[in-house]
Image (cartoon, coloured by chain):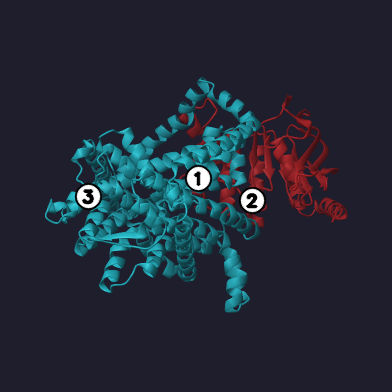
Amino acid sequence: MENRELLKVEAVCKNFQSDDHQSDLQVLEDITLNVYKNEFVSIVGQSGAGKSTLLRSIAGLLSPTTGKIIFEDKLLNKPDPNISMVFQHFALFPWLTVEKNIAFGLENNRGLSREQINHRVNNLIEMIGLAGYEKAYPRELSGGMKQRVGFARALATEPSLLLLDEPFSALDIVTAKQLSEDLIDIWLGNQIATKSIIMITHDVQQAVQLSDRIILMDSHPGRIGKIYKVDIPRGKRSIKNIVDAVEEITAELVARITV
Amino acid sequence: MLQTAGIDRKKERVRSAIGNFILLFIIALFVFILVASLIKMNQPLTKLPAQDNLSKKQAVGDFLSVGNLAYFSMRTMFRMIVGMAWSFLFTLVFGVLAVRYKTARRIILPLVNFLESVPLLGFLTFTTTFLLGLFPGNVMGAEAVAVFAVFTGQAWNIMLTLYQTMEVVPSDLADVTTQFKCNAWEKFWRLEFVYSIPGLLWNVVISQTAAWFALVASEQVTATIPNDTNLMLPGIGSYIQIALDRADFIACLWAVFALLINVVLLNFLVFQPLIKASYYFRYDEGTTSSNPPKSIIYDLIEPASLGHWFLAKFEGFKYFWLYRLPKVWYFFKLDFIFRILGKMRRFFTTLWYIVLGIVVIVCAIKLYHFLPHSDFSIIPKLTLYTTIRVVIAMIVAGLIFTPLAVWVASDKRRLSFIQPIGQVIGSIPSNVYTPFIVIFISLGYRQLEWWILPLIMVGCQWYYFFNVIGGYLAIPDDIKEVTKIFPLSRFRWWTQYLIPSILPYIVTAIINAAGAAWNADIAAESIQWGKNTIEVTGLGQYISANDGIKDKSALGTLAMCFVVGLCIAFVWQPLYKYARERFHY
């Protein structure tokens, strides 16, 4: 496995102004974190631990108050075309068809002709399992299919880093399992340009099932609590042999809950 | 199998042909209205008939012939369309400026809030002088007055809608546009504008009343050119005015009928299909109680091959609009200039307050010398009378139409049946009802006094009706279910569930209704019926009695603005803020 960092988060702090404009609310405190190439990292933690803030900072949607984020050896201070994000509630445009939604990020800023865009979109539709739904509108799709569109849109720009913000938590268990397995297959099969994935989740079992490393975040202010490495090779993981790891992390999570 | 496929294809082709035919018909109709009106418009002003000549029975008797109404409808419709186009343009430019630049917002929002509530009728004397000056001696000038009236009836409302929806664009979608590095131009057209379309359309439909009202009112007041004759533009509004002058009740009925047909046509051919098309743009809010809109025309046009051809062409245009056009902007480094301007926020804020202060002082001094001092003593009394009338009418209208709207909205079948009818009736401007009240009064030898109240109410009641329906539908489904599972007494149902749930909507309704009520009152305080003038004492009567006399008109208008301004600053704004913060889901 190639062991070079794709992303370096260095001593990042993030403050938000509180409602009364008097004091600052610290959301992230001194986050330092490396994500290597070909790595799947999950972030778990209590609600309000700043997971989303961290992910949005990496996406370039928020800028850190102090500290810096380095992506592909360059300082990151605005959204990077090589980073894409998948949203919990899909964030699809209701007025665009499936194919137009997927092409959303391709239409601007890139030197792609319309034929190239169509080609890429059609490939993704095949790969993600959306064939036959090209002309459908999001409201006509089930939750699972909507999130497939969400994944396809994020992957369309061929990002090397994919950010997932609780991508499966709005889906039922069976759909979530199927979709996550499909994602891993596509990723491991090198069908996409994506090198690494960062995922936020509340589901510890899912995190263990999918990840190489799991980062447990503490809250108020959000900081890195503990980091677990999943040793069982990804292909050999089953509900039975990951149960110890799941229990250990869950117990740790509960122990760290602050009221 | 093969045969049925063949039949299906045949059916499809027939449906497409029908759709093409209807689409072409609608396009041709509106192109015809635009072109024909434009040709007729470019005439010297002296060609227009004067009100005094038309009012005499023996003179040019054919002005009131029913056959004229078709042509008049066309001209009125033309003004409506052009006025809407201007409102739309205004909305885009100033709505976006208000959202993007805090400095611009400081100026635009208070001004628009104020203009929204100020009755336009008070300003007619001044806008007329100005707009006639733009096209000296040409009918275009008079047309511009009427078009401007439509504009003032709608533009403010529509712009505020755009502003408000752009403020609440879902943050997820906004994140997606940022993530994919859309610039401000792309972000607006690909997200914010499309997201606002359903709301914008809905508001255009609701504010039609105000637009038709303004149109009917301004065709009949029109121009006092140098020798002080009232000129009549060909249109339904002037038709009504002449019918009133001649005390011709049958002609009044015909005019109302013609106006109704106009309203129905515009809704049926344009708004209903558009609303249905934009229904699919809606972002899900977790309420299922609203019915999907219906439109026969939309269903017929949908399979038209011509429509699909247009859409395909539109794709290419969209590409040009989104990605090619802004290059000009960036080529001239205009973004750079705007960024610098945006950075000088504090400078502009200070400048704005200084300029505002100076302007207010200068205007106050100038106005004080300009206004007729002799009338100062009577103005407070007139203002008080008018205000009392407006307030009473608004309260009564609210008490009747809020429960009515809740009753209608609470049942899906009832709603889908009554709402379209309400929309058509609601679009009829209040000044159309004048003849009926007049007949009633003159038959019974009564005074106008209290009979003015229904005339004000028809002007403002529909704002309650539509806003409350909207509010009821916006209550989340699970909250509605909770109130069903835990039955409340009638009294608690209203006080603890319904009124708090829809309070922001009621406040919006009151704000909208206030503007319309002032307008209706100003128009209704002095009515012509044949040779008789029926009036009540009030500001509206003062303004219409002094129509064309600038200093007195200014005084009346100013008094009105003063009251309206006080209401906005000390009642509506705080109430709205309170309702928004305290009662929302």
Residue B227 place in picture, x, y as percent: 24, 40
| Residue B21 seen by the camera | no
Most extreme residue toward the left is B58
> Of circles 1 and 2, which is in front?
1
Q: Which of B322 and B237 is in front in this view?
A: B237
Q: Nearer the viewer, residue B307 or B438?
A: B438
Instruction: Report the amino acid beneath label 1.
Output: Val
Residue located at (43% from left, 51% from top): B375
Pinpoint the chain carrying mark 3. B
Residue B112 numbered mark, or none: 1
State the residue position of label 2. Answer: A178
Determine the CA span between mark 3 and mark 1: 34 Å
Most extreme residue toward the front is B374
Pinpoint the chain carrying mark 1. B
Q: Supply the letter of whichever chain is red.
A: A
For disc 1, the neighbor class at 10 Å (few under 14, some 14 to 19, many from 20) is: some
State the residue position of label 3. Answer: B51
